[in-house]
Image: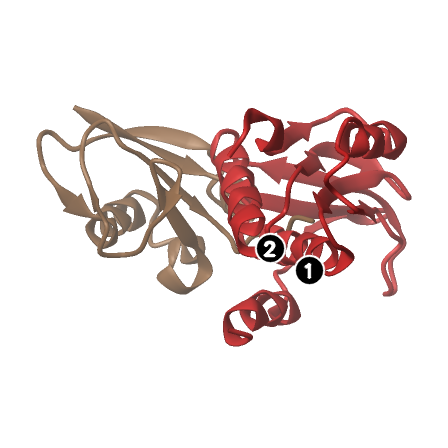
Chain colours: A brown, B red
Amino acid sequence: MTLRVLFFARLKEQLHTDKLELDVGDAILSVSELRKRLLVMFDNHEALQVTRTLVAVNQQMANEETQVTAGDEVAFFPPVTGG
Amino acid sequence: MTTDSAPRILVTESDFSVGNEHQRLIENNPQQGAVVCFTGLVREMAGDVSLTALHLEHYPGMTERCLLDIAQTAQQRFGLDRTTIIHRVGTLALNAQIVFVGVTSAHRQAAFDGANFIMDYLKTQAPFWKKEIHTQGHSWVDAKETDNLAARRWNQSE
């Protein structure tokens, strides 16, 4: 029972990875709780701090309270700079 | 909404022809009196390093959804008819075309405002990221507060 985590742009380079599968069993987590797990995995990397990243759940913009579970796609990325 | 006015959304590494896109917007479209087209280009930015290229990364899937949502919001808000958004990704040389927004409406004001609205929202909402490639290396472009302010003014004007 995994959820997929994606990283983009500067965040991807800083963490040296663009995606990972995280085993969450049948738990329902908030984005905030997921972020805490990732911070443990990435040695408290500053790139993953709340103020530096946006989050999307299943390709819709989300926030720290959004709930996620196995099968979801959760993406973390810096503020966007297209156009 | 008729199928004719379903937004045309493209995220692609390929270049585009403004002439062809303009033609697509106006052909067999006798009710619409105005067409506004905007093209964004890679420019040599001010600073002490000279830019040689831009690299554009995006979030496949979410980007297309987000652009479609912006286009449909603009169509409803400004009463636009046809709407096209094209955004390139990958490595783009100086002066290359990055983005195209084209809209049609019965009268010019809605077309100008609609195209402007789409660009303001695209720049602050759509998941694209620019990296500048210069002679000494590369650096990610930081988001600008002025772009956020530009997008926010559309909420204040109502």
Residue at 60% over, 33% down: B5
Q: Nearer the viewer, residue A47 or A68?
A: A68
Question: Spatial distance from mark 2 to mark 1, Cα to Cα?
Answer: 7 Å
- Mark 1 residue type: Asp
Q: Residue at point 74% right, 57% down?
A: B112
Marks 2 & 1, CB-CB < 8 Å contact: yes
* Same chain assignment for discs 2 and 1: yes
Q: Amino acid at mark 2?
A: Phe
Residue lying at 80% horizontally and 33% vertically, measured from the top left: B26
* Location of residue A11 in the rendering, given as x and y in whole percent from the top left corner: 50, 46
Q: Is residue B31 visible?
A: yes
Q: Nearer the viewer, mark 2 or mark 1?
A: 2
Q: Earlier in the sequence, mark 2 or mark 1?
A: 2
- Which residue was labeled with disc 1? B113
Residue B16 seen from this side: no
Q: Left or right: A55 with respect to B154?
A: left
Q: Which mark is drawn over residue B78? A: 2
Crowding at mark 1 (Cα within 10 Å: few <14, some 14-19, many 20+)? some
Q: Which of these two is toward me, A73 or B11? A: B11
Q: Quadrant of residue B35?
A: top right
Q: State the image quarter where residue B141 is shown.
A: bottom right
Q: Nearer the viewer, residue B113 or A20?
A: B113
Please tell me whether residue A16 is drawn above or below residue A45 in the rendered image: above
Going by the picture, which residue comes out furthest to the front?
B31
Query: How crowded is the residue under tag 2: few (<14 C-alpha within 10 Å), some, or many (20+)?
Result: some
Chain for numbered disc 1: B
